[in-house]
Image (tube, rainbow, N blue to C red):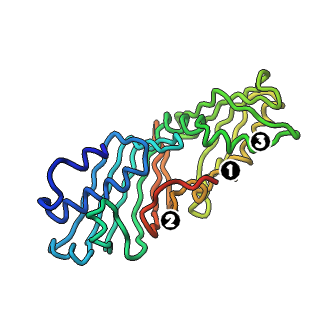
Amino acid sequence: MVTALFTNVPMQNQSGDRLVSKAAGAAIAALFKSSDKVEANVRAEPVAKLLQGSLDGFDFIGKGMRMYNGLRIEVMELYLQAVSIDFSAIFTGKVKLRQPIQATLRTVLTESDLTTSFNTPFVVEKLQRLKYQGQSLHFQNTQMTITEDRALRLKTQIGVGNPNQPIDVDFTANVEVEDRRKIKFVNVKYNGDQESVDLGKSLIDHVNNLLDLDKFALENTQLRVDRLRVGRDDITFYGIAKIEQFPSGIKNK
């Protein structure tokens, strides 16, 4: 979809708002390995304001966004008001902000996205930083689903020291936001024998410390979640994104 943002029509023959829309949409889309759909729209009235780099607003909607680290986002929407940019940078295909901005953010993750994320090397490496009884952990076949009562259920197999002798870990939990930036599993119910429960408790403590949005944000951005809604087969996050400059990648903490 990034290539679709730039057609064969010469840039000088395009209207200013369309030109900025394409450049801004491409700048965001370039942060992702691939996208199913990307739409960007700049609002400026009169359009002549663009020559001074003044925008009334900017809307971005992306679907099926796949990040370079393997994470996937079903839907990402950004809505900005009163944006000031360096208009001359647009002709080089870049978007440069004259001052930091704050965008309203809506993000949707499906069950499949959640399962995929917990199996990516990016997240698995962070999970395996946990030591249990002094031994390293080996995760495999991790699956996350949403139950009928809108709780999250995580099932995984964890090898403690020996990856060939995994322990089944299975728990159900509600999810909430703490301090607008930490995603927490709460009201956890564990299944299995005592060995499985003890390992599951250690995993919950580790994951709750891991799911800090500041560890997953793109560079030059800060994400804050005001509320989340668990649906039948997806989770929707509502919040804001504070952007100092258009980012070029994800922090790798």
Q: Quadrant of the C terminus?
A: bottom right
Q: Which residue is mark 1?
A: 208
Vertically, is 29 above or below 179?
A: above
SS class, disc 2: loop
Q: Which residue occupies the foreground of this view, 107 or 42?
A: 42
- Residue 60 place in picture, x, y as percent: 32, 56
Reading the chain from its start, which is encountered first: label 1 or label 3?
A: 3
Q: Residue furthest left?
A: 13
Q: Residue at x 73, y 40 (%)?
A: 128
Reading the chain from its start, which is encountered first: label 2 or label 1?
A: 1
Q: For mark 1, does the 10 Å Cα neighbourhood hold few (<14), some (14 to 19), or many (20 or more) residues?
A: some
Q: Residue furthest right?
A: 134
Of badges 3 and 2, the one in the foreground is: 2
Type of the residue with mark 2: Asn
Reading the chain from its start, which is encountered first: label 3 or label 2?
A: 3
Q: Which residue is mark 2?
A: 220
Determine whether label 3 and label 2 are within 8 Å by CB: no
SS class, disc 1: helix
Q: Which residue occupies the foreground of this view, 210 or 146?
A: 210
Q: Which residue is mark 3?
A: 201
